[in-house]
Amino acid sequence: MNFLFNRYVVGSLSALTLASAALAQVLPRSVDEPTPNAPKVNLPKVDLTPDLIFKLLMGEVALDRNQPRVGLRLLMDAARQTNDPRVAQRVTEVAMKERQFKEAMEAASLWLKNDPTSAQARQLMAALLVNQQRLADAQPYLEQWLSADKTRLGSNLVQLTQLLARYKDKKAALSLLKTLAAPYADNAQAHVAVAQAAWSASEPELSLTEARAALAIAPDMELAALFVAQALQLHSDEEAMAFVADYLKRYPTAIDVRMSFTRLLVNKKKVNEALEQFELLTAGAPQNPKLEINIATLALSLEQWDVAEAHFKAALSAGFSDPDIIALSLGEIEERRKHYVEALKWYAEVKPGERYVNAQARYAAVLVKQGNLEAGNRHLEMLLEQNTNVQIQLIQAQANLLREAKAYQRAFDVLDKALKSHPDVVDLLYDQGMMAEKIERFDVLEKNFRRVIQLRPDNAQAYNALGYTLADRKIRLSEANQLIKKALELSPNDPYILDSQGWVYFRLGELRQAESVLRQAFKLRPEAEVGAHLGEVLWENNQREEAKRLWTDLIKNNAANETLLETIKRLAADLIPIGK
């Protein structure tokens, strides 16, 4: 060995050990002594020359010393020199790990050339081509992958679906999947794969057809049933529920479908029926912490506090992996019950981590509900001094606490102070812009939202907030319309942006378009503010009885909503009793 080799290898015993082990794996001492359990491949006869040993060992040493480019270059040279698929495999795997996709492609090609039977090489080659947006080039590899082993066709189709799910052009991915699945029309998983791709490509009718075809082959296939239910829900919740109820009569142990049925019942506020499903779910799978969490979360959305509490505690007892979410949820339950002391205890259980700031914000909010705004504010200020790593989140929590207490100027000032130290933090700019609207500092509002758009041109909510504000103030309506249209380009079918678009149309006097868009927004998100806007458009469009019915229904559960209250007081105060 030359001096350079000795210098590097002697300097790192661990690297030498690693490299020696790798050399033993990729090149047996002779072709008569194959590696145990290795596939039967016609391996090349290779002389272990000093040059080859140097490349293999030094390549591994470089990788061990965090020099991937050097290591890959040396190992790639060895792969070309030997034509050994095991060396090419090693290079492919390292290049994939290091996200060096050009090198990975070359190595995978060499691996497949020297071992055409390798399913793993074929799959990696296909994945690399898909990653590079080259579906046409990937197609023959994918076809070979599916046809090579019919016994694994189902699981290979699942992997294929997951691979193509990451492809940006959903229509192109669907087209390819239809072609790949065509030879396997008698396989239920093939139809489900197309159903999933069709759903992602916004073709729900095709998704429904394919899912039904899968059920015709495998009537108990839960995933197919879920796609049918999902597509039917676009027609109507009732149609989806009827299908799922019938499926469960035939397959009562289908937990995922029963969970879907339960969610549908929860969405329709069918409390008693949902509670029955909770019992059936737990009876079918006792001591399943994930299931307990799902049931508890659904019960929470129905405001069934006792049921939610019981299932959260069952999940905790069963060793659920995220006890902080349980403590946070139990704190919320006690807060809703106005058991403030118990709520504080649960929020205090949440440890530093992903949910910590949220728990501390709720802790402070409970102190405010106990009548002590200053204690809540002080609690967050003390945390700010101790936790600089989550400083921005805590500042946001403090501002939100003050906002909920209607201390708008103080919330604005907290954010203003923070922005002096963090001038271009998008979240702080956005939050202060919202507070600026409350104190009628429209100059700050516009400046902040324009800065957010400059920093994050893809921030749909900044375009929406600025556009809505201009429309609500009845100024620069053409500009407001353009801002909202840009927001919808970035986030199509967002109900809040659709609400803004409808409001812009209303301000422009385009009542028919306003009504159409606001009905769409209200269907997606039947909330008080959207309903207030829709009702006002109906009122101006001489559909006053419908507007009164809408507002009367909304005010029952949204008596504190400022937009709804202001709208009713301005237009129908003598027709709709408020607070009764």
Image: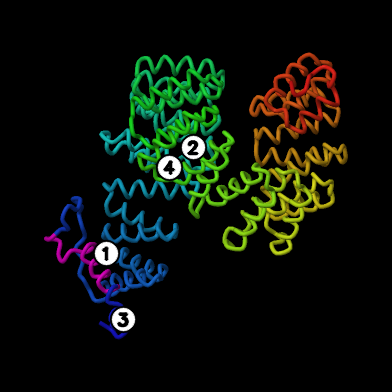
Q: Is 488 above or below relative to 444? A: above
The secondary structure that dominates the magenta segment is helix
Which one is closest to the eye, mark 4 or mark 1?
4
Around disc 4, counting alpha carbons within 10 Å, would you say few (fewer than 14), some (14 to 19), or many (20 or more)?
some
Image quarter (top left, top right, bottom left or bottom right) of the C terminus: top right
Per the model, the C-alpha gap separating discs 3 and 1 is: 28 Å
Check disc 1 and report its element: helix, strand or loop: helix
Query: Mark number for residue 173?
Result: 2
- Residue under label 1, please give it: 82
Does label 3 or label 1 sit earlier along the sequence?
A: 3
Towards the viewer: 7 or 503? 503
Amino acid residing under circle 4: Leu
Q: Is 22 above or below relative to 268? A: below
Towards the viewer: 456 or 432? 432
Q: Position of residue 382 (x, y in %)?
A: 62, 59
Name the side, left or right, on which 239 lies relative to 442.
left
Does label 2 or label 3 sit earlier along the sequence?
A: 3
Name the side, left or right, on which 18 lies relative to 263.
left
Amino acid residing under circle 1: Thr
Check disc 3 and report its element: helix, strand or loop: loop
- Residue under label 3, please give it: 11
Around disc 3, counting alpha carbons within 10 Å, would you say few (fewer than 14), some (14 to 19), or many (20 or more)?
few
Q: Which residues are magenta?
A: 15-33
Per the model, the C-alpha gap separating discs 3 and 4 is: 42 Å
Q: Quadrant of residue 61?
A: bottom left
Outermost residue toward the right? 475
Amino acid residing under circle 3: Gly
Amino acid residing under circle 2: Ala
Q: Does the residue at mark 2 contact the one at mark 3 (Cβ under 8 Å)?
A: no
Q: Is 489 above or below relative to 556? A: below
Does label 3 or label 4 sit earlier along the sequence?
A: 3
Per the model, the C-alpha gap separating discs 2 and 1 is: 37 Å
